[in-house]
Image: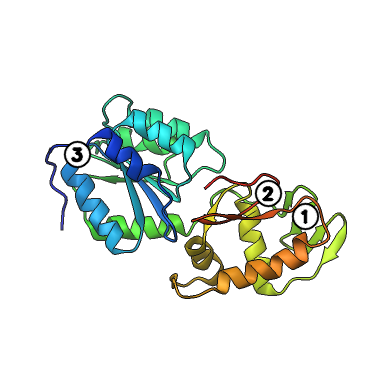
Amino acid sequence: MRAKARRGKQPCASTRWQRLLRPKGERMRILLVEDDKAVASFVRKGLESEQYAVDVSWNGEEAQTLVGEANFDLVILDLVLPKVDGLEVLKQIRGRRPSPPVLILSGRARVEDRVKGLDLGADDYLTKPFSFTELSARVRALLRRPLEPVGIVLRVEQLEMDRVERVVKRNGRRIELTPREFALLEYLMRNAERAVTRAMIIEHVWNFSFDSMTNVVDVYINYLRKKVDQGFQPKLIHTVRNIGYSLGVREVAA
């Protein structure tokens, strides 16, 4: 099935802001920046059927505000947008740390346009018209990638992890972890100061789809707290209400 470019009435700004900024709970969160209502609806419905949480922004200015205030696992970005051009939005996204992967979805099909988008930091470029099956496959591929290039040694305050030697220390004291605890702590450290959902943890640490009935993430977070935080100050592992967890000195707002 291919998306058809068609215009329609857009919802009022206040309604969209309430929907866009509320916590999304347990699913991978995608920001879709697309001013064509038909295309946006087509893509959103397809992604939601695959259990992603999808927020839609209709113009570049609103998208810039959202990427500055909220955490997304992926951004799907049109280039021809009202108010602010898509390439300017891309530049702002690439100025963030951590910076989510960006898939450009655009009618600009010339080689020069694709090269420019990729050179400015896009991770992938798909031209319209497009197959949703191909878009879905590209989304899955991007979400499997690490958020940022990762060094051999990760550090958050006095907590240190050597990813090659598989050694974890806090204040110089070695902490013994099981392989699963190590993988969970590594994921949290790679996303330091960022809220991650239980679904994101399940996808990256256990590599299977999230089951809302399971408490395996909470159980392992408990194990980590006893080993990483107990007897140390400041506490590094925080619960982010309605979202999941974060690791860092500062608590991340929900």
Res 97 → quadrant: top right
The image position of residue 52, as x and y in percent, is 36, 58
Task: Assess whether mark 1 and mark 3 are in contact (beta carbons under 8 angstroms).
Answer: no
**Image point 49% across, 66% down: which residue?**
203
Residue 57 visible, this angle: no
Q: Reading the chain from its start, which is encountered first: label 1 or label 2?
A: 1
Residue at label 1?
160
Q: Secondary structure at mark 3?
A: loop
**The residue tagged with tag 2: helix, strand or loop?**
loop
Circle 3 residue: 36
- Precedes in sequence: disc 3 or disc 1: 3
Q: Position of residue 151 (x, y in %)?
A: 68, 51
Q: Tell me if label 2 and label 3 are in contact, CB under 8 Å.
A: no
> Please, what is the three-letter code of the amino acid marked with disc 2?
Gly
Mark 2 nearby-residue class (10 Å; few <14, some 14–19, many ≥20): many
Secondary structure beneath label 1 = strand
The residue positioned farthest toward the right in the image shown: 172
Q: Disc 2 designates what residue?
A: 248
Q: Position of residue 62 (x, y in %)?
A: 35, 32
Q: CA distance from mark 1 to mark 2?
A: 12 Å
228 or 133, which lies in front? Answer: 228
| Type of amino acid at the residue the image marks with label 3 | Asp
CA distance for labels 2 and 3: 39 Å
Which of the 4 quarters of the picture holds residue 76? top left
